[in-house]
Image (spheres, rainbow, N blue to C red):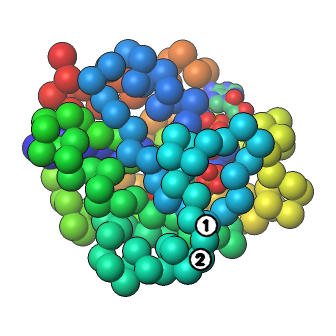
Amino acid sequence: MARAVVITGPSGVGKGTLIRSLCERLPELELAVSATTRQPRPGETDGEDYWFLSAAQFDARVRAGAFVEHADYAGARYGTLRSELESRMAAGIPVVLEIEVQGARQVRESMPAVLQVFIAPPSLDALRARLVGRGTDDPEQVEARLRTAEEELAAQDEFARVVVNDRLEDAVTELVEVVRPATGTL
Ligand code: ADP
Ligand code: 5GP
């Protein structure tokens, strides 16, 4: 079993929040830093939250085959760089990928042994409240993300495991138990 795990699900469902707790509970896990063409949000740092690239830089990496997967999402491009995975996987370090559904499908094709976990919200209303409450996206972005969320939620049956992020502590506990065996983390 490849020591990697994909965490997917709609924007605002709590993937980032859950992954922070997951990495505290399973400290061997490392998060792959994605590349994106979207603008950094206040407080986001290049190389920590994302590799922030121009459209031309992103394209050049696509052409060079530098991405494991990449997708267009809400008006920007996102992708997982091979360099984020290969050295860690070769060193036996389990890696978490936090990606949207189109990217998860590409990883399923190229790395079928990698566990994929879909994080679902308790309801669409709760998802909207989280996106609005996070305060990082303007109303137009919130609507774009919710429209995509409806398609993503319809695809959840494709995924090996679904964790509903209702009460945060319960979801963290469930996610740790789902991920632990797949990563070989004790
Ligand atoms: P994602 O990474 O999936 O886009 P975030 O982790 O940024 O989502 O979470 C979106 C918002 O929802 C954040 O403000 C976060 O604090 C909040 N949140 C996460 N999980 C829960 C939960 N179980 N209950 C209520 N709010 C939550
Ligand atoms: P955000 O703009 O909120 O940071 O991310 C928007 C969406 O892009 C989220 O659903 C997030 O999981 C997804 N995403 C982040 N990094 C990647 C990536 O490397 N590849 C893909 N396919 N999606 C990503």
Residue 23 position within the rendered picture, expressed as x and y whole percent measured from the top left:
40, 24
Specify whether residue 106 is in view: no
- In this figure, which residue is indicated by the disc labeled 2? 55
Q: Are marks 1 and 2 in contact (CB under 8 Å)?
A: yes
Mark 1 to mark 2 CA distance (whole Å):
6 Å
In which quadrant is the N terminus drawn? top left
Lower position in the chain sequence, tag 1 or tag 2: 1
In which quadrant is the C terminus drawn? top left
- Dividing the picture into quadrants, the one containing residue 102 is bottom left
Which class describes the residues within 10 Å of circle 1: few (<14), some (14-19), or many (20+)?
A: many
Residue 37 position within the rendered picture, expressed as x and y whole percent measured from the top left:
61, 66
The residue furthest bottom is 63
Q: Which disc is residue 37 wearing? A: 1
* Residue located at (15% from left, 28% from top): 184
Residue 103 position within the rendered picture, expressed as x and y whole percent measured from the top left:
42, 64
Q: Observer-nearest residue: 46 or 141?
A: 46
Tag 2: amino acid: Ala
Tag 1: amino acid: Thr
Q: Quadrant of ligand 2?
A: bottom right
